[in-house]
C-alpha cells in the first residue's frame, strides 16, 4: 500500500472514530430511543420541557415521500430539543387533518377532533411522566388551528398540577413567511406544496426520500392564503431548482425561530 492510500485509510479511520465518539457523547433527546429509566433520569436531571410535534402522511407529487412531514418533524424536534438544552422530543404524531391531498394514494386523513384527541392523550402521558412544560408544534398546515385551540384548554386543565401547555407556531408560520421571502428575493419560482421549499428541506433531511428524476412542474401556485389546488400532479409549483443546501438554510430558520419562541413562552410563564 503506497503512502497516499495509507493516508486516506488513516483519515477514514479517524473520521469513523470521531463519529462514533460524537454519537456516544451526544445526549439523547428522542424519547422512543431511550429506556424508561433514562427518560425518568433525564426529567429528574432537569429536562422539564417536552415537545409534542405533529406531522402528516400525505401525497406531495411523484418526487417526495409521503412521510415528508414526519421526517422533517423528527429532524426539527430533535434539533430544537438539543438547542433548548432542557427538553425531550415525544414520539411524533404522524397523522393529521388534510384537504386536497386526500384525493391521492398514500395520504392518511384524520378529523380535527381525532387529531386533537390524540394530542390531548399524548399530553396527558407527558404530564404523568413528570414534565412541567408541554409544547405543541406542527409541521403541516392542517395541524395549526387544532393545536392553537387545544393548547389553552390543556393549559387550564393541568395548571393546578404545576404544568403549563403552550402552542408554538414560529417554527412553522413565521418561518414559512421568512422562507417565502428568501425564495422571492433570490428569484426562485413560486412554489408551495411539494415545491422548492418542501423538496429542499426533505432533501437536506434525507436524500433517500426525494426522487430527483421525478421532479417536474406541478399545478400553478394559487394566491397566498388560497386552499391547496393540487390538480392532477399532486403538488404545486416547480421544484427543479431545489437543493439540500437550500433546505439546510430553511431548516435552520425553523430551528432558530422555534427555539426562540419556546424559550420566550417558558421563561414568561409560571408553573404555580
Image (spheres, grey):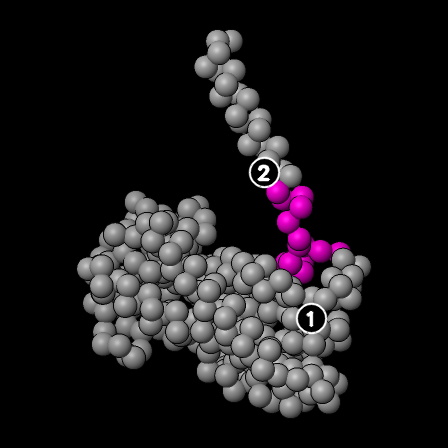
Q: Residue at x 47, y 76 (%)?
A: 169
Q: Is residue 93 above or below residue 217?
A: below
Between 159 and 55, which is closer to the camera in this rendering? 159
Q: Is residue 59 above or below residue 20?
A: below
Task: Classify residue 163 as left or right of residue 44.
Answer: left
Task: Find residue 156 and report its image quarter.
Answer: bottom right
SS at badge 2: helix
Q: Residue at x 21, y 67 (%)?
A: 220
Residue farthest top in this picture: 1
Residue farthest front in this picture: 267
Task: Classify residue 220 as left or right of residue 147.
Answer: left
Task: Classify residue 253 as left or right of residue 135.
Answer: left
Residue 114 visible in the current orientation: no
Which residue is disc 2 drawn over? 19
Quarter of the C terminus within the rendering: bottom right
Which region shows up in magenta? Answer: 22-35
Q: Is residue 19 above or below residue 196?
A: above
Between 66 and 174, which is closer to the camera in this rendering? 174
- Residue 48: give its label: 1
Residue 237: image location, x then y, percent: 24, 63
Amino acid at each position: 500500500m503506497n503512502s497516499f492510500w495509507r493516508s486516506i485509510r488513516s483519515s477514514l479511520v479517524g473520521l469513523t472514530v470521531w463519529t462514533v465518539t460524537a454519537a456516544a457523547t451526544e445526549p439523547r433527546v428522542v424519547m422512543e430511543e431511550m429506556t424508561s429509566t433514562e427518560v425518568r433520569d433525564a426529567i429528574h436531571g432537569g429536562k422539564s420541557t417536552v415537545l409534542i410535534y405533529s406531522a402528516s402522511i400525505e401525497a406531495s407529487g411523484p418526487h417526495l415521500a409521503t412521510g415528508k412531514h414526519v421526517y422533517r418533524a423528527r429532524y426539527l424536534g430533535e434539533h430544537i430539543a438539543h438547542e433548548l438544552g432542557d427538553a425531550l422530543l415525544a414520539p411524533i404524531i404522524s397523522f393529521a387533518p388534510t384537504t386536497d391531498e386526500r384525493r391521492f394514494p398514500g395520504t392518511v386523513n384524520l378529523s380535527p377532533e381525532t387529531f386533537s384527541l390524540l394530542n390531548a392523550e399524548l399530553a396527558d402521558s407527558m404530564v404523568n411522566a413528570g414534565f412541567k412544560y408541554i409544547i405543541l408544534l406542527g409541521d403541516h398546515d392542517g395541524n395549526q388551528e387544532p393545536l392553537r385551540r387545544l393548547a389553552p384548554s390543556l393549559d387550564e386543565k393541568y395548571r393546578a398540577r404545576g404544568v403549563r401547555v403552550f402552542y408554538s407556531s414560529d417554527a412553522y408560520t413565521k418561518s414559512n413567511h421568512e422562507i417565502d421571502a428568501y425564495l422571492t428575493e433570490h428569484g426562485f419560482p413560486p412554489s408551495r406544496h411539494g415545491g422548492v421549499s418542501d423538496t429542499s428541506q426533505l432533501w437536506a433531511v434525507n436524500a433517500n426520500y426525494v426522487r430527483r428524476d421525478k421532479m417536474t412542474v406541478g399545478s400553478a401556485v394559487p394566491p397566498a392564503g388560497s386552499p391547496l389546488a393540487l390538480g392532477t400532479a399532486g403538488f404545486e409549483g416547480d421544484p427543479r431548482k431545489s437543493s439540500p443546501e437550500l433546505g439546510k438554510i430553511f431548516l435552520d430558520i425553523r430551528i432558530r425561530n422555534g427555539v426562540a419562541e419556546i424559550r420566550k413562552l417558558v421563561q414568561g410563564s409560571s408553573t404555580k
